[in-house]
Image (cartoon, coloured by chain):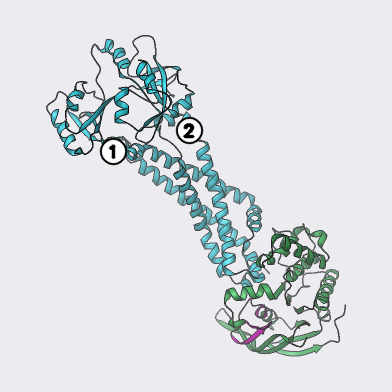
Chain colours: A cyan, B green
């Protein structure tokens, strides 16, 4: 049996040492949570991708638009059930730091191809009826305090508005996706509004950046991709048709090896913390070797004193780790308000990340306490008492 | 009261230091009766503390048989020996050996953590032991807030908290002034007389040894003369 009071008192005996060790754990675990959440955010699109969805884009670049008449022809390809077009709009609210993803699209087709988009406030009917209507993810609605029915003026860095300085939208509904293929910080608005606004400037209907295709049940994915690419092999605009996962992956690969780099940094941080904790616990054992000798003389078993040393390490590391987790979770709204929110809209310190971080803290505690625990177990009472007397 | 609390037969203990083997106890034969107060005397290096450690199960003999409180210590595993020690032996050290981060009452409670008592019962037992040594009003004090004599009395309270049969005291008055030493010796005599504890006290101090009922002399690892006194002076 271990006295938790003794564990706590010994940790408080060297307040500065314990505080510094806990602080290093708080910082390290916080950093680890943030890095993992960033990696999860980067890869969330790939993870949430559906097998029955394909994406068609220009073979030249994602930034080259495809003609609108491609849609009707692609709808004739056997195996294609529904198609929706998405055009990147590149707008922000009030100032550039309030940047989020926004797309012009077809309201009806959007829900056919992305059934995981769930309206939680307002209605799709309202959106259909209102040419300036839009639906927004619950995260941006919460962040910018937008309400259903509110008019929001946006400034697009790509498409100047037909009149005035801003494009005006009305929040028709707020959605929350049931998968990570759609993030919670995106806005979708009516294609018609976009087309009518842009047409006078360009003198023709705008194209679209991407088409999302939903396959019919049992359709041969590879055959559909092959046929669509073959259809436009000789122009006017060659296309690439890929799975949704492959499409999302290109955004991950655009960042090079950043996820790997992030996790490497995280691992490095973890090792550094573990070494600091090992050092702290070795010093703690050196201080308490005499106490261990006394406890053994009083009848505490070898396992009991080993557990006593190990529990100190676990207590210290778990306390620091849990504070780090709390800091990561608590600072999330603050981080999302900055540029990080715009760059990584899917950033979220998930329960899984918190459990992993807490488990790693416990693991560090076990590693740091292992050597002192072993030494306490092996130490003979007479030697421990003689060394001081 | 004539049962043997400690019985040693041919006990041998050697240490190897810097490649040299040193025989500390050399075939020691010894018998100590239950309920008596023994003083163990002898020159430095005669094996007094080594014998105390063997009797307390803190160290193991190389050869021979050692029975303490009816148990052959050589037959016990590490865990069994720890449990036996917790139940049967109370230690009092020269340097007091209290845990500095715990208060007096918490130090006394420490061995009781190994007993089946609940928290309230442990506290009750610890307070009773402190009362026996006259320090119930110092229960909340940390060791560094106590005098040497008070620290040693707390250590004695800790030694008797689990109500062991045997108390092993290694130079309990060695670090104390004369007045504090007398108080500690008075206490040991009381524990022997009133609570019938068997006490084995290692000492260099002939004055302290006078308080014991029997004085056992060790010399070069072997039993020397044994002096018997009529009664312990209180």
- Residue A335: assigned label: 2
- Pick out the residue farthest to the left: A234
Subunit of mark 1? A
Q: Which numbered tag is attached to residue B51?
A: none
Classify residue A179 by image quadrant: top left
Q: Is residue A43 left or right of residue A208?
A: right
Of the numbered discs in the image, which one, if any, rests on residue A245?
Answer: 1
Tell me if residue B153 comes above or below residue A113 in the rendering.
below
* Image quadrant assignment for residue A70: top left
Residue plotted at (53% across, 37% down): A330
For the N terminus of chain A, which image quadrant?
bottom right
Residue under mark 2: which chain is it in? Answer: A
Q: Eyeballing the image, is B206 above or below A197? A: below
Asked if residue A147 can be seen in this view, the reply is yes
Q: Position of residue B209 (x, y in %)?
A: 81, 81
User: Where residue B89 sits in the image (x, y, percent)?
Assistant: 70, 75
Please state which of the two labelled residues, at mark 2 or mark 1, is closer to the viewer: 1
- Locate residue A240, reporting x and y percent: 20, 32
Q: Earlier in the sequence, mark 2 or mark 1?
A: 1
Q: Position of residue A18 (x, y in %)?
A: 60, 51
The residue tagged with tag 2: helix, strand or loop? helix
Dividing the image into 4 quarters, which one contains the C terminus of chain A?
bottom right
Total numbered circles = 2
Residue sitting farthest toward the right? B234
Magenta segment, which residues? B53-72
Q: Is residue B63 magenta?
A: yes
Of B113 and B225, the residue lying toward us: B113
Residues marked 2 and 1 touching at CB (< 8 Å): no
User: Is A194 in the magenta?
Assistant: no
């Amino acid at each position: 049996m271990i006295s938790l009071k003794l564990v706590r008192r010994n940790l408080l005996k060297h307040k500065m040492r314990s505080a510094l060790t806990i602080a290093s754990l708080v910082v390290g675990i916080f950093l680890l949570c943030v890095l993992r959440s960033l990696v999860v955010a980067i890869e969330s699109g790939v993870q949430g991708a559906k097998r029955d969805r394909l994406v068609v884009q220009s073979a030249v670049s994602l930034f080259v638009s495809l003609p609108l008449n491609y849609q009707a022809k692609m709808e004739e390809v056997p195996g294609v059930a529904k198609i929706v077009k998405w055009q990147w709009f590149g707008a922000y609210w009030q100032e550039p730091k309030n940047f989020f993803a926004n797309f012009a699209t077809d309201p009806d087709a959007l829900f056919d191809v992305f059934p995981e988009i769930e309206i939680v406030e307002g209605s799709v009917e309202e959106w259909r009826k209102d040419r300036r209507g839009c639906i927004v993810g619950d995260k941006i609605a919460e962040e910018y305090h937008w309400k259903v029915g509110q008019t929001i003026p946006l400034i697009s860095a790509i498409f100047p508005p037909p009149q005035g300085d801003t494009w005006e939208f009305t929040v028709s509904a707020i959605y929350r996706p049931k998968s990570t293929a759609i993030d919670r910080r995106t806005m979708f608005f009516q294609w018609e509004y976009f087309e009518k606004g842009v047409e006078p400037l360009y003198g023709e209907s705008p194209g679209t950046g991407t088409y999302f295709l939903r396959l019919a049940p049992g359709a041969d994915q590879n055959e559909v991709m092959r046929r669509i690419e073959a259809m436009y092999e000789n122009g006017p605009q060659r296309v690439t048709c890929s799975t949704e996962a492959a499409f999302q992956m290109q955004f991950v690969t655009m960042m090079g090896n950043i996820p790997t780099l992030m996790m490497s940094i995280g691992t490095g941080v973890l090792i550094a913390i573990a070494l600091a904790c090992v050092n702290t616990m070795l010093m703690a054992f050196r201080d308490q070797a005499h106490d261990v000798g006394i406890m053994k003389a009083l009848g505490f078993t070898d396992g009991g004193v080993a557990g006593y040393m190990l529990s100190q390490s676990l207590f210290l590391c778990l306390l620091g780790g849990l504070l780090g987790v709390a800091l990561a979770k608590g600072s999330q709204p603050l981080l999302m308000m900055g540029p990080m929110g715009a760059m990584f809209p899917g950033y979220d310190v998930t329960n899984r990340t918190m459990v992993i971080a807490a488990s790693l803290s416990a693991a560090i505690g076990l590693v740091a306490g292992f050597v002192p625990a072993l030494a306490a177990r092996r130490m003979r009472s007479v030697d421990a008492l003689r060394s001081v007397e | 009261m004539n049962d043997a609390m400690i019985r040693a037969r041919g006990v041998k203990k050697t240490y190897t230091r810097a490649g040299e083997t040193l025989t500390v106890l050399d075939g020691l034969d010894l018998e100590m009766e239950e309920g008596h107060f023994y003083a163990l005397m002898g020159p430095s290096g005669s094996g007094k503390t080594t014998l105390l450690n063997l009797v307390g199960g803190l160290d193991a003999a190389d050869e021979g048989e050692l029975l303490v409180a009816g148990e052959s210590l050589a037959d016990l595993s590490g865990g069994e020996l720890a449990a036996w020690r917790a139940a049967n032996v109370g230690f009092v050290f020269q340097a007091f050996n209290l845990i500095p981060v715990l208060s007096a009452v918490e130090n006394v409670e420490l061995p009781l953590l190994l007993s089946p008592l609940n928290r309230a019962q442990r506290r009750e037992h610890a307070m009773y032991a402190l009362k026996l040594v006259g320090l119930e009003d110092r229960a909340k004090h940390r060791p560094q807030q106590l005098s040497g004599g008070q620290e040693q009395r707390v250590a004695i309270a800790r030694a008797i908290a689990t109500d062991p049969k045997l108390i092993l005291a290694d130079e309990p008055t060695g670090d104390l002034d004369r007045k504090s030493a007398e108080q500690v010796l008075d206490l040991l005599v009381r524990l022997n007389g009133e609570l019938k504890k068997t006490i084995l006290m290692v000492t260099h101090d002939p004055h302290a040894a006078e308080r014991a009922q029997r004085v056992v002399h060790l010399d070069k690892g072997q039993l020397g003369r044994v002096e018997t006194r009529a009664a312990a002076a209180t």
